[in-house]
Amino acid sequence: MTKLGYYLGQRSVNKAEVARRTGLTRARMNELTLTETSKLRAEELYLIALAINVKPAEMLEEMYHDLTLIERS
């Protein structure tokens, strides 16, 4: 499962409803939530955030809070 999949699962979001509201296909929603190698585009994240009534920046922060910059030596 992907970070988006965990994020939506924690909120008990209906993926079919999100697909309908965003115009993304169910297949694309499944790919974004289940396939680790899938790449979530900014436009998709923005639409998904709108569909589930959260701020896109908050969604990004929660999903990717573990990323850090490489330390320069």
Image (cartoon, grey):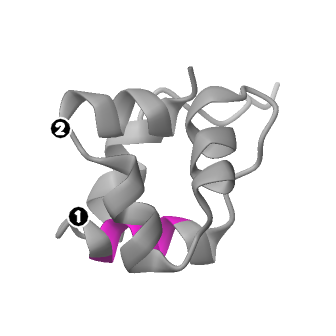
Instruction: Determine whether the residue tagged by mark 1 lies in a helix, strand or loop.
Output: loop
Residue 34 is one of the magenta-drawn residues: no
Which numbered disc, 1 or 2, marks the residue that appears first in the sequence? Answer: 2
User: Of residues 33 and 63, which is closer to you in this image?
Assistant: 33
What residue sits 60% from the left and 41% below the top?
A: 30
Asked if labels 2 and 1 touch by Cβ distance under 8 angstroms, the answer is yes
- How far apart are the two marked residues, 1 and 2, measured between alpha carbons? 9 Å
Image mark for residue 52: 1
37 shown above or below 16:
above
What residue sits 62% from the left and 64% below the top?
A: 25
> Which portion, as a residue range, is magenta?
45-50
Instruction: Determine whether the residue tagged by mark 2 lies in a helix, strand or loop.
Output: loop
Image mark for residue 11: 2
Quarter of the view holding residue 65: top left
54 shown above or below 16:
below
> In the displayed structure, does residue 58 sit left or right of residue 3?
left
Q: Position of residue 7 (x, y in %)?
A: 34, 35
User: Of residues 25 and 9, which is closer to you in this image?
Assistant: 25
Residue 48 is one of the magenta-drawn residues: yes
What residue sits 69% from the left and 41% below the top?
A: 31
Q: Where is residue 67 in the image (x, y as percent from the top left)?
A: 56, 32
Quarter of the view holding residue 16: bottom left
User: Of residues 18 and 69, which is closer to you in this image?
Assistant: 18
Q: Position of residue 54 (x, y in %)?
A: 20, 65
52 shown above or below 1:
below
Residue type at numbered disc 1: Ile
Residue type at numbered disc 2: Arg
What residue sits 24% from the left and 70% below the top?
A: 55
Where's the N terminus, which quadrant?
top right
